[in-house]
């Protein structure tokens, strides 16, 4: 998820994947620029005419990549892959394959082994297998042949998560953690609670051992490339956990894809970890009702006695949802009146794009959704010379066996620009409820709908979901994703301090004369990424100092929260701000 971290370089680094999430991004306040007036409402037509030849067992990006390689050559294919965030090297393109999994209900996945054999026979290799998921590399010319295999249900660019983004975090005193740190331990466990920070990477953590981090930690990468230092975000999260629970024993673990996440959590279960801090989120990876592959990982952790503490997300201002409406009967969604383009401003040197899904996931059976037969497509536009121009589109097939998802990006410009998204009904028998997430925008998107902006797996009933509140005055941070879930469940569960100090991102600033009240302070760790490890550290303290189980600890943290916002649980603060003191 985006880290709301002011006065960082304006270039947003993005996890390049068709189903990924934003990596570290600067705060919206830091990206304000003088910009032209927003374009007026748009009535449009057009978009790419590629859908009719699309392979229904391959996602749009891979199908387009295969077609470009076949028609225009390898150099043009590499350029397209780089622009659309597809990982490539000399061995080919990284893919994630869903096997047909005919015996999934019995826990048997022989088709995955058949997929492995087919990948190898086509000149590729397999990196990981988990149940019905096979992750590997494959030469581009072999993509169509692989998807034609009867053991293959679907081939896609791997789903990917991303972070939401001697100093002591201000959350320690605000929450009362300092009052617990000197209390004698209840259990003799040979040390503090085992806590895992599961993240994208831990750049620079070695230099902080013995100061901002414990003198020794367990560090392990589950990425295919083994790169533990892929990102700095996890290091900052680990600092906050250590500030809150100095005796906690830390596991620093990173993963990139879904299969890697499964393996990482299985490892943490074997290691006896009791708390997982996860300041990450996924777009287009589930129905928003607490089901799907990522939520299954959270359920697995909970079933094995682990408290999973998850960031709510930082997408409240980047979110729109609504039922498809087409008042002029031209096939394009009217967002308001005759306006058929949802627009947002993107500052210079910032990557942008959008994710779209809709309410036709079907039933989750433990390995896959039953699939969508309602087919919508999306087109990304940019505004130049007084008119909207097509940048790209996404035209996944939805014929009853695929997920109801589309994604466009990752586009980058060296000048500020208006971008827009249009949604077309390709083949649907009903008007579905659609959901849009954008990234890279410096202000709330046009027709912004903050409600329901939670990211996966913060919708999981097994997760303790944490929103962001300001450490100085408990005010709500407007970017913090809000509930409810898509089945109406209350989320987030609690909020916790954000805008705090870490050595990784810098010290939090006090009030600055003339600084706008709505703007984030410079040089601090903002976002629900900072809030989640604060709550995870609090849970570790309770587990060390009390006889509570992880499940009981979550209940205590919710019960002790300081009520904020509307009385009782609400969709901004949950039960209220994290509080370890007696109420």
Image: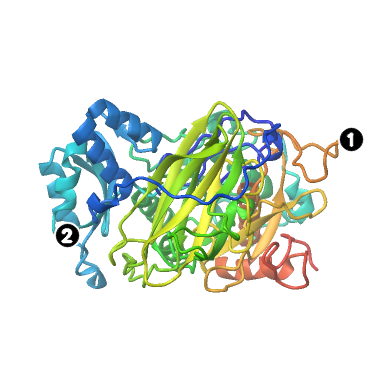
Q: Residue at x 68, y 34 (%)?
A: 35
The one of 323 and 565 positioned closer to us in this rendering: 323
Using a 10 Å C-alpha cutoff, classify the residue at mark 1 as few (fewer than 14 neighbours), some (14 to 19) or many (20 or more): few
Between 332 and 33, the residue placed more toward the observer is 332
Residue at image position (46%, 55%) is 423
How far apart are the alpha carbons under marks 1 and 2? 64 Å
What percent of the width, then of the height, locates residue 302? 47, 66
Image location (x, y in percent) of residue 293: 38, 61
Label 2 sits on residue: 111
Residue found at the far right of this picture: 513
- Left or right, residue 576 beside residue 45: right
Label 2, residues with CA under 10 Å away: few <14, some 14-19, many ≥20: many
Residue 282 can be seen, yes or no: no
Label located before the other in sequence (1 or 2): 2
Question: Where 399 sits versus 170, above or below?
Answer: below
- Residue drawn at x 16%, y 41% is 142
Instruction: In this rendered view, identify the residue nearer to me: 192 or 209.
Output: 209
Q: Mark 1 and mark 2 in contact? Answer it, CB < 8 Å.
A: no
In the image, farthest residue toward the left: 121
Of the pair 286 and 338, the residue shown nearer to us: 338
Q: Kindly identify which residue carries mark 1.
A: 513
Secondary structure of the residue carrying numbered label 1? loop
Residue 295 falls in image quadrant? bottom left
């Amino acid at each position: 998820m985006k880290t709301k971290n002011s006065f960082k370089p304006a270039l947003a680094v993005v996890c390049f994947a068709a189903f990924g999430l934003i990596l570290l991004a600067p705060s919206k306040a830091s990206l304000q620029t003088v910009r032209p007036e927003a374009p007026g409402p748009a009535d449009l037509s057009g978009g790419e005419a590629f859908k009719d030849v699309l392979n229904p067992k391959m996602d749009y990006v891979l199908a387009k990549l295969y077609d470009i390689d076949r028609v225009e050559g390898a150099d043009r294919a590499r350029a397209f892959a780089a622009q659309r965030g597809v990982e490539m090297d000399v061995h080919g393109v990284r893919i994630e394959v869903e096997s047909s999994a005919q015996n999934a209900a019995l826990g048997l996945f022989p088709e995955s082994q058949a997929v492995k054999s087919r990948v190898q026979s086509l000149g590729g290799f397999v990196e990981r297998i988990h149940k019905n998921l096979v992750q590997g590399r494959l030469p581009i010319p072999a993509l169509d042949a692989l998807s034609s295999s009867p053991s293959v249900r679907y081939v896609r660019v791997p789903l990917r998560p991303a972070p939401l983004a001697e100093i002591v975090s201000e959350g320690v005193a605000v929450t009362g953690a300092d009052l617990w740190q000197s209390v004698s331990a209840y259990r003799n466990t040979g040390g503090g609670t085992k806590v895992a920070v599961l993240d994208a990477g831990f750049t620079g953590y070695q230099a902080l051992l013995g100061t901002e981090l414990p003198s020794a930690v367990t560090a392990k990468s589950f990425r295919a490339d083994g790169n533990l230092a892929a990102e700095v975000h996890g290091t900052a999260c680990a600092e906050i956990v250590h500030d809150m629970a100095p005796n906690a024993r830390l596991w620093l673990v990173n993963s990139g894809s879904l299969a890697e996440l499964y393996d990482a959590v299985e490892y943490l279960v074997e290691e006896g970890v009791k708390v997982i801090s996860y300041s990450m989120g996924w777009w287009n990876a589930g129905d928003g009702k607490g089901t799907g592959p990522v939520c299954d990982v959270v359920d697995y952790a909970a079933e094995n006695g682990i408290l999973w503490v998850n960031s709510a997300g930082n997408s409240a201002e980047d979110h729109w949802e609504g039922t498809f409406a087409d008042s002029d009967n031209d096939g394009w969604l009217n967002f308001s009146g005759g306006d058929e383009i949802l627009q947002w401003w993107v500052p210079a040197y910032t990557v942008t794009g959008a994710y779209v899904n809709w309410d036709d996931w079907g039933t989750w059976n433990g390995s896959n959704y039953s699939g969508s037969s309602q087919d919508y497509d999306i087109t990304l536009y940019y505004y130049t010379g007084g008119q909207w121009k097509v940048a790209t589109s996404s035209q996944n097939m939805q014929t009853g066996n695929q997920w109801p998802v589309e994604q466009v990006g990752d586009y980058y410009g060296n000048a500020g620009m208006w971008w827009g998204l249009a949604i077309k009904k390709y083949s649907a028998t009903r008007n579905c409820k659609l959901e849009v997430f954008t990234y890279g925008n410096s202000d709330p998107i046009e027709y912004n709908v903050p409600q329901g902006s939670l990211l996966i797996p913060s919708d999981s009933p097994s997760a303790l979901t944490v929103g962001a509140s300001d450490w100085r005055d408990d005010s709500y941070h407007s970017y913090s994703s809000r509930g409810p879930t898509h089945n109406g469940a209350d989320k987030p569960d609690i909020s916790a301090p954000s805008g705090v100090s870490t050595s990784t991102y810098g010290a939090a600033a006090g009030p600055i004369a003339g600084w706008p009240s709505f703007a984030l302070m410079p040089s601090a760790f903002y976002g629900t990424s900072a809030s989640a490890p604060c709550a995870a550290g609090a849970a570790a303290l309770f587990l060390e100092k009390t006889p509570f189980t992880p499940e009981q600890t979550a209940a205590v943290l919710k019960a002790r929260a300081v009520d904020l916002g509307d009385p009782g649980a609400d969709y901004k603060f949950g039960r209220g701000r994290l509080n370890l003191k007696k109420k």
